[in-house]
Image: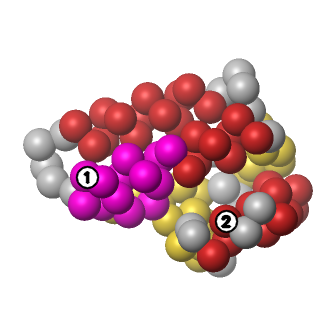
Amino acid sequence: MIGELDVDTATLLRDIVVVLTEAPSGAPQVTVDLTELQFMDSTGLGVMVEALALLRTAGGDLRLRSLNGSPRRVVELTGLDKVFDIAS
């Protein structure tokens, strides 16, 4: 993700995850590179939680990579750093 994950961009992430969960190739293990994510609002965070739930329901998982700055603080303040698999 580059730039912002907010009300204007969150549906793109949701749509990608839905396509991945419906693919016949099996349970997707998805890693989202957030190196260049500068901002995430509550809508973006909600879509991340929804994506995690969809993937886990399909037998897959969601991993966040390089979550830093303001987006990382949002995840930590909500306690979701204990829910998501976050890699450096």
Check residue 30 for magenta coloring.
no
Q: Quadrant of residue 66?
A: bottom right
Task: Residue 75 in the image: state x and y as whole percent.
Answer: 75, 61
Badge 1 is on which residue?
A: 58
Instruction: Work out which quarter of the rendered image holds the N terminus and state it.
Output: top right
At mark 2, the secondary structure is helix
Disc 2 marks a residue whose amino acid type is: Leu
Residue 40 drawn above or below residue 63: above
At 25% from the left and 52% from the top, the residue drawn is 58
Q: Is residue 2 left or right of residue 21?
A: right
Task: Residue 11 in the image: state x and y as whole percent.
Answer: 56, 26
Considering depth in this image, is 76 or 19 the residue closer to the camera? 76
Task: Residue 81 in the image: state x and y as whole percent.
Answer: 67, 71
Quick one: label 2, few (<14), some, or many (20+) residues within 10 Å?
A: some
At 11% from the left and 43% from the top, the residue drawn is 24
Q: Is residue 60 left or right of residue 38?
A: left
At 53% from the left and 55% from the top, the residue drawn is 32
Considering depth in this image, is 36 or 78 the residue closer to the camera? 78
Residue 46 drawn above or below residue 58: above
Q: Is residue 84 left or right of residue 60?
A: right
Q: Give the CA separation, mark 2 to mark 1.
A: 20 Å
Mark sitting earlier along the chain (2/1): 1
Badge 2 is on which residue?
A: 80
Q: Main secondary structure of the magenta part?
A: helix
Disc 1 marks a residue whose amino acid type is: Ala
The magenta segment:
50-62
Scheme of colours in the image? secondary structure
User: Hey, which residue is sitting farthest top in the picture?
Assistant: 8
Instruction: Work out which quarter of the rendered image holds the C terminus and state it.
Output: bottom right
At 80% from the left and 40% from the top, the residue drawn is 41
